[in-house]
Amino acid sequence: MNTFQRVIKYLAIAFAIFLTVTILTGIVGLISSIFGVVKWSDEKRTDYSMDYSGIERLDIKHRVGKLIIKPGKGFRVEATNVSESFRTKEVNGTLIIDEPFFVGRFLWFNFGYADNKSVITVYVPENFTADSIKIDSGVGEVHLEKLTADRLTINAGVGDIYGNNLTAKKVNIDGGIGSMKLTDIDFSNVDLESGIGDISIEGIIEGKTEIDCGIGSISLNLNASREDYILRADTGLGNVKVNGRKLNRKHYDNYLADNIIRIDGGIGDVNINFYY
């Protein structure tokens, strides 16, 4: 995909999201004007908790509100102010969490009705290493704390994502509209596609890293030496800088190193800083 095609792609995504939100808001406004105030809060809410054992994988579809995944005494899901349709289940070692999407709650979140925001907390045992962790984020915040997995997949949505002390051998990140900040990470073999929001990653990244830039900026602050990486960059409209130095439109260095970073530039800037 060339630079022009990438520009068209991400502008189309941004417009589609804007159009979707506008249409949803318009529908609610129309219904309200015809039938009076729509009482989305009539949807029944509840609290939920469930303990599990023998979990090897996490598959979480986060719709609205706040999602927290962190260590605890065992496998446990706690949720407050969720819909009665909220469910969790274990299937062949995979903990599956899902909640049907509800337009009313989407609009509540965006227009500041804090009393209707749900909080879902997933506890995993200390020193737990998952075969895989997959998170499909919707509207709201995601907080990831001290997690280890062979494979980590994050599909970002509208809200912000924060992660600290994360370890994974294979990582797939698909950026969304909100920002993403991951600190104290130890990743290998990363496939990163930014969206509209900004992405900031701090820590260790080894192996093969593929970066496909979108509209938002990408910042990598790596605890490594520049000489330990081969860099390949095809810049787009945005700048690509390494330790503050702007790279040429097509950059191919000839370092002999075990790690490689390939950058397919877009609209947003890419800044990579090495700290050894």
Image (tube, rainbow, N blue to C red):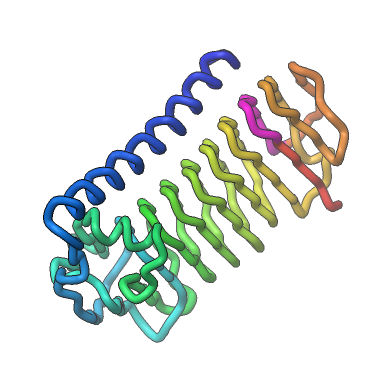
Residue 72 sits in quarter: bottom left
Image coordinates for residue 58, horizontal then vertical, percent: 33, 61
What percent of the width, then of the height, locates residue 112?
41, 65
Residue 273 appears left or right of 15 = right
Q: Is residue 18 magenta?
A: no
| Nearest to the observer: residue 95 or residue 42 | 42
In this view, 117 is above or below 103: below
Which of these two is toward me, 124 or 250?
Answer: 250
Whether residue 253 can be seen here: yes
Name the residue at 63% across, 28% down: 267
Q: How many marks?
A: 0
Q: Is residue 90 visible?
A: no
The part of the chain drawn in magenta is 258-269
Residue visible at 41% across and 37% down? 18
> Relative to the observer, which residue lies in front, 156 or 29?
29
Residue at horizontal 42 percent and vertical 60 percent from the top: 140
Residue 236 placement: quadrant: top right
Q: Name the residue: 20% across, 64% down.
A: 40
Farthest residue to the bottom: give it: 73
The answer to whether 127 is drawn above or below residue 179 in the figure is: below
Q: Is residue 60 left or right of residue 160?
A: left
Residue 208 position in % (x across, y down): 61, 36
Q: Position of residue 61 (x, y in %)?
A: 30, 56
As for residue 267 lying within the magenta part, the answer is: yes
